[in-house]
Image (cartoon, grey):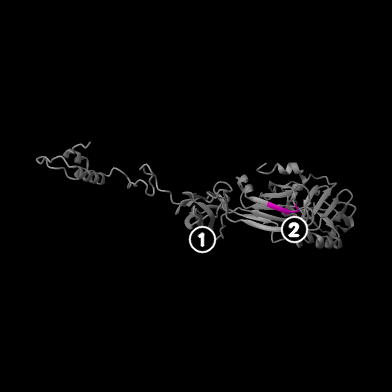
Amino acid sequence: MYRTVHPTASRTCTGPAIPARRRPRALTVPALLLALLLGAAGCGGHDGAATAPGAPGGDAKGGTSAAAPRPGVTVTPAAGRSVAPGTPVSVTATGGGTLDAVTVTPNGRSGDGVDPVEVTGTLAADRHTWTSDRTMTPGTSYTVTVTSSDAAGTKATTSSGFRTTAAAKVNGVTATPLNNAVVGVGLPVSLAFDKPVTDKAAVERALDVTTTPAVKGSWGWLTDPLTGIQRVDWRPDTYWPSGTEVTLTAKLSGIDTGGGRYLRRDVHDTFSVGTARISYADLSTHRMRVTENGRTVKDFKISGGSAAWPTWNGTMVVMTKQSTVRMTSSSVDIATSEDSADFYDEDVHDAVRITTSGTFVHAAPWNDRYMGKQNKSHGCIGLSAADAAWFFAAATRGDLVIATGSTRAVVDKGNGYGEWNLTAAQWHALSALA
């Protein structure tokens, strides 16, 4: 049944009203249909155009359905943003698409001239998400490039850019060993920091040591009691096996070491372990036995620290060696006046350093008459000139010197590489992640 359309029905639309003095007749059926169609077009009752039944986007019952979403990607941080170096980067495939590849690449050097790092990440098994797994270099512009595919396999490439904020404060790090060195069995992997680290866990999570063959060990945090320098070392549970290949990967660029003080560079290096050279210095018998791979190769007469200035007990590690070192009593707070009986100022030859505090194995010809008989030094282990020359030539950074029989305490764990005086369990406890 058709009903009559009255003029007032048009007042719901935005068009002009029909003047009241004209009273139109009831519309015929064709006119009614035309009026309904015109009214639907003028009133804007829907956000989008309707879809006819059976047409794409419609259904057999004449209803409408949403258009199929177009595949795309969402990148975080958003384009043009400035974010902290520790901000995660994430990419998500939308509209039923999948991710094929994601790269996060720096655009040139950082604002302060550092070579920035490329950001690595992990693609989920379903290929719908990618998430970064590291921090970024401060003050650097980055480009995110994404290759994705839709359900039909059609590929598309999307790019987005953002920038990391510059570091108002920075920290520096010095790594040991470096440059594919061959070292002794006692040298730990060591990272020394210019400024103290308060967020030790954040730093330690960015560190990785791999070895061939596999060697068990742990990171531990130390502070040198003399210099105050803080460092984190990776020490094996027992001495390195000779022939071990070691790789350090430290993803440090962009790590906040605490209070907004950032590290700016990664560290990556390898080294290998050579001869197992261990020297046993007995301060009570005044002799030092040198072994290589478990076999005694030398047995030296020595003169260690006197009763007033005894040598440290404990396990020490060769740090450096110098053919000539000027040693003064004032530099180690023994004596500053030439009138003192303990005053000295000497050019010492064939000096092999084993503590930060100034313990050396070196030539001490002025004590030749005491070698093998009496301890007369100010804490160092003295050898004859000929014996010192042999020891100096053989010594390699990382060799071990184990002193016993002294009246002095065991060397502090942070004094040089004194950490070998701790058990493996004690060492593991110094990890920030323990």
Q: What span is in magenta?
A: 209-213
> Which quarter of the figure is the C terminus placed in?
top right
Task: From the image, tell me which residue sits under label 2.
Answer: 272
* Residue extending farthest front: 1
Which secondary structure, mark 1? Answer: loop
Which secondary structure, mark 2? Answer: strand
Task: From the image, tell me which residue sits under label 1.
Answer: 107
Viewer-closest of 318 and 9: 9
Expressed as whole percent of the image width and height from the top left, the position of residue 314 reads: 80, 47
Q: Quadrant of residue 137?
A: bottom right
Tell me the residue at 64%/56% (across/down).
267
Tell me the residue at 72%/58% (across/down).
271
Magenta stretch: dominant SS? strand
Does the image show residue 312? no
Horizontally, is 27 left or right of 263 in the view?
left
Disc 1 crowd, CA 10 A, few/some/many (<14, 14-19, 20+) = some
Expressed as whole percent of the image width and height from the top left, the position of residue 87 reads: 52, 49
The amino acid marked with disc number 1 is Asn
Residue 16's place in the image compared with 166, above or below, is above
The amino acid marked with disc number 2 is Ser
Q: Is residue 212 magenta?
A: yes
Disc 2 crowd, CA 10 A, few/some/many (<14, 14-19, 20+) = many
Tell me the residue at 67%/58% (across/down).
269
